Amino acid sequence: MNFNALTAEQISAFKNDGYLILPKMVPAAHFKQMVTITNEHLFDAVPPLEYETEVGYAGAPSSFESLGGRTARRLKDAYHRHEVFKTWATDPHLVKMLGQLLGEQVCLTLAHHNCVMTKHPDFGTATGWHRDIRYWSFPRNELISVWLALDNEVESNGGLRIIPGSHRWQIKPEQMDDLDFLRPDVAENQALFAQGISLHLEKGDVLFFHSGLFHAAGRNNSRMIKESVVFAYHGISNAPIVGTRSASAEDIALP
């Protein structure tokens, strides 16, 4: 892969806004292979998978036997699923950029994300405003998710919405529900929702976003499945807390 290190302006933008979009980072042949493998594994239901009915968000099928009950939400363990995903997750140019943002040696966690996200028409559910750190256990909220768009992503097909700068906010417990989503019934949150923006990602674009950044996604109102590859990274001094879910899978120090 041939791209330059992040500029000082890009690093400053990420620290201030909590996200950064880098266009067309993946070579065409490598990108095409990821799309091909994703579609093959989705069609053949190659395990491990997570289904919408297992997550149980509003509008999800109620059981595997109900209409749409076998709608996949993600292809899990992308790192071990195929060499093409492992190659992307450990690409030295990508790791160099992450090292610039984290300020130290980079580690890839396989306990979180490590998947191909899929959003289907009809049965793909919306996701409310949340932060990934809500279910991650690390000493510091300083992780970065790397989201590679395998399709064009816009609001109408369930593309991500983010609230710029929200990784720097202090949120009171009463603003959150039991699953750590921002509560829409809390008046104070309405002003926060109003700051949300929809991201427009082209095929092959990469989004870096901070683990404390509030983000959400609507339903897919198109007729095509939307797919994205997602991995998460942290600095070597910010190791997962022993005994938690975050320490339940391999943690890989990258050179």
Image (spheres, rainbow, N blue to C red):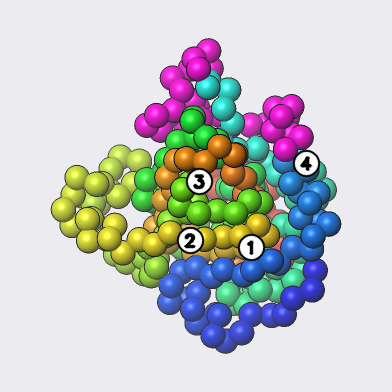
Residue that carries the numbered disc 3 in the rendered image: 157
Q: Earlier in the sequence, mark 2 or mark 3?
A: 3
In the image, taking residue 195 as reference, residue 43 lies left or right, namely right
Q: Secondary structure at mark 2?
A: loop
Tell me the tag on residue 244: none
Question: Marks 2 and 3: which is nearer the front?
Answer: 3
Q: Amino acid at mark 3?
A: Asn
Q: Residue at x 81, y 56 (%)?
A: 30
Q: CA distance from mark 2 to mark 1?
A: 11 Å
Residue that carries the numbered disc 2 in the rendered image: 199
Residue range of the region highlighted in magenta in the rendering: 39-67
Residue 236 visible, this angle: no
Q: Secondary structure at mark 3?
A: loop
Callout 3 touching callout 1 (CB < 8 Å): no
Question: Marks 3 and 1: which is nearer the front?
Answer: 3
Q: CA distance from mark 4 to mark 2?
A: 25 Å
